[in-house]
Image (tube, helix red, strand yellow):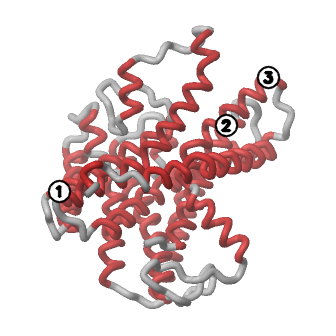
Amino acid sequence: MNLKSIQMLRGLAALLVVYTHSISQIGIFALGWQQRMPARISLGTFGVDLFFVISGFVIYISACHLRGRMASLSFLWHRFRRINPTYYIAVLLTVITWSPSLIRQQRPPITGWEALSWTILLPFPGDPPRAISQAWTLCFEWFFYLLFFLLILARTKQKARILCWLLGGLALLGWLLRNYLSGLLVFYTDPLLLEFLMGVGIGYAWQRWNPGGRTALCLLWPGLALGLFFILTGYGDYQAILAPPASVKYLHAIFWGSAAALIVAGCVFLEKSGTSNIFFRHQNFGPDLRPDLVGKPRFARLLLLLGDASYSIYLFHLLIFGWIAAFYLRVGFFLNPDLAILIDAAIAVAGSLFFYKIIEVPLLRWLRSTPPRSAKP
């Protein structure tokens, strides 16, 4: 299954994250009007919310029918090969760029505990710093995958209902014990888990409900309006607060997550209804759920390309920003800051697309041709 609306949303979410990080980086060298925008951080924050809701939807749709030990191992292998190898290469390239500062002892030496935390994408005791700062979202992804793995292993048919109890219960427990939890327990009861649950709910409804285009738009437009309101005002943006209290984090997960969920639901139901004339039309709507694009094919193809490459964009863009910053430090900053934000963001996206073509695509192609030993005849 490959929904074009999902791919376009992934591409949009990745661009939001890149743009926010570009604003932050240029702020080191000069200040422009974009650094003073209320939305400078909220854009990237909402991009992450979209990613989490999309992940819950995609995992449920693609794996809700799986049951048993072999299916659970296959699911785990598919998730590992999709996430970890490309991430490891991004970490390796990042560490290589640290080599000069490590040799000159300008950076503390890498400890074995740090290296182990980079290998296992789950929170570690002591919270050692990540080689790639944005990898914190991958920890949430992997926790959700492990819960889904256990449900497949247990052969349960009621995955949506059990996930509702599990994720909802963990978030509720985090709220009830908010004044007593610390360390790893804060992560495992984080309200952001509710955004995955929202995606699961959309997937459950998507399998059983086929609304018309008007109903889909009634979900999409309020989601866009709410998302725009939260982005512009920063209301409930926990990323903009150094040490956000539990109330802000729960406010964010419920409000921002709901806005992201309405957008995702509106887009996938709009595509399923086949009535949209914005990006696609209902033609040859087969099992792969990929109707033909119309209107502006070049723009549509670009959005799909960004969606396909969204993981590489998410992983590699900060590495490219680091290279750009090193260039500025060597030659001096010489651009208008507002122009530099856009130029650097474009360079980061283009460079990430290059990594997507030469690293992620060949790597995935090779891994798909080498199944785990347990799956071999």
Q: Residue at x 30, y 40 (%)?
A: 187
Q: In the picture shown, does residue 90 fall above or below 64?
A: above
Which class describes the residues within 10 Å of circle 3: few (<14), some (14-19), or many (20+)? few
- Disc 2 vs disc 3: Cβ atoms closer than 8 Å? no
CA–CA distance in space, label 1 to label 2: 43 Å
Q: In the picture shown, does residue 279 fall above or below 12?
A: below
Q: Which kind of residue does numbered mark 1 sit on?
A: Arg
Q: Is residue 59 left or right of residue 302?
A: left
Q: Which mark is residue 321?
A: 2
Q: Which mark is residue 293?
A: none
Mark 1 or mark 3, earlier in chain: 1
Question: Dot 1 corresponds to which residue?
Answer: 69
Q: Residue at x 72, y 78 (%)?
A: 296
The N terminus - image quarter: bottom left
The image shows residue 244 at horizontal and vertical percentages of 41, 39
Mark 2 or mark 3, earlier in chain: 2
Q: Which mark is residue 330?
A: 3
Q: Nearer the viewer, mark 1 or mark 3?
A: 1
The image shows residue 126 at horizontal and vertical percentages of 32, 24
**Element marked by disc 1:** helix
The C terminus - image quarter: bottom left
Return the residue nearer the eye: 229 or 98: 98
Q: Residue at x 53, y 61 (%)?
A: 10
Whether residue 159 is visible here, answered yes or no, is yes
